[in-house]
Amino acid sequence: MIKKTFLNPLPLLTFVVALTFLSSCEKSPEKTIVGEWAVINREEKSNSNPNWIKMADCWLDDVETFTKDGNWELYSGTNWCSGQTNGLTKGKYSITSSGSRVEFTYDKVPGKYNDDIIELTESTMVRTYNSGDLNNTQNRITYRRK
């Protein structure tokens, strides 16, 4: 007589369910945005120029830093553009619940400022914002993680 043995499927089923759950979890934008980001491209468009136009290379040495505790810094590099502030700008940031927008407050400047997050991966971030001028100027900045 042949004896049939069956494996208990519970351990395997538990492993598969746990693996599926863990692989479906995405990193939160707050965790992904933390770190140093170097500007690699900056473009703008407006009512009078509706196509994205690359801006001057003087922006390409800018670096933004986001910390885990919500602090934000912009180092404007040594190659300043006309009208760009020199040195270091500091403030706070938060990510909206949808993960599609970052809100900034600047030290010693009232108000909140918003950028839309177009792309955010481990190595790349793309953000857009409206400069608020009468020509409806839009800016798009692409970053690479340092």
Image (tube, rainbow, N blue to C red):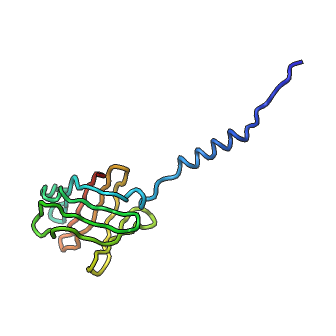
- Is the residue 110 above or below the residue 142 in the image? below
Q: Which residue is drawn at 63% across and 41% down?
A: 16
2 or 78, nearer to the observer: 78
Residue furthest to the left: 82
Residue furthest to the right: 1
92 or 112, nearer to the observer: 92
- Is the residue 12 above or below the residue 63 in the image? above
Q: Which residue is drawn at 44% across and 64% down?
A: 98
Q: Position of residue 105 (x, y in %)?
A: 32, 74
Q: Position of residue 54 (x, y in %)?
A: 16, 55
Q: Residue at x 29, y 52 (%)?
A: 146
Count of numbered marks: 0
- Is the residue 123 above or below the residue 135 in the image? above
Quadrant for the N terminus in the image: top right
Q: Where is residue 140 in the image (x, y as percent from the top left)?
A: 25, 59
In the figure, residue 68 lies in which quadrant?
Answer: bottom left
Q: Where is residue 128 in the image (x, y as percent from the top left)?
A: 28, 62
Q: Which residue is drawn at 32% across and 71% down?
A: 104
**Is 136 positioned to the left or the right of 121 in the image?**
left
**Is 122 positioned to the left or the right of 38 in the image?**
right
- Is the residue 4 above or below the residue 121 in the image? above
5 or 135, nearer to the observer: 5
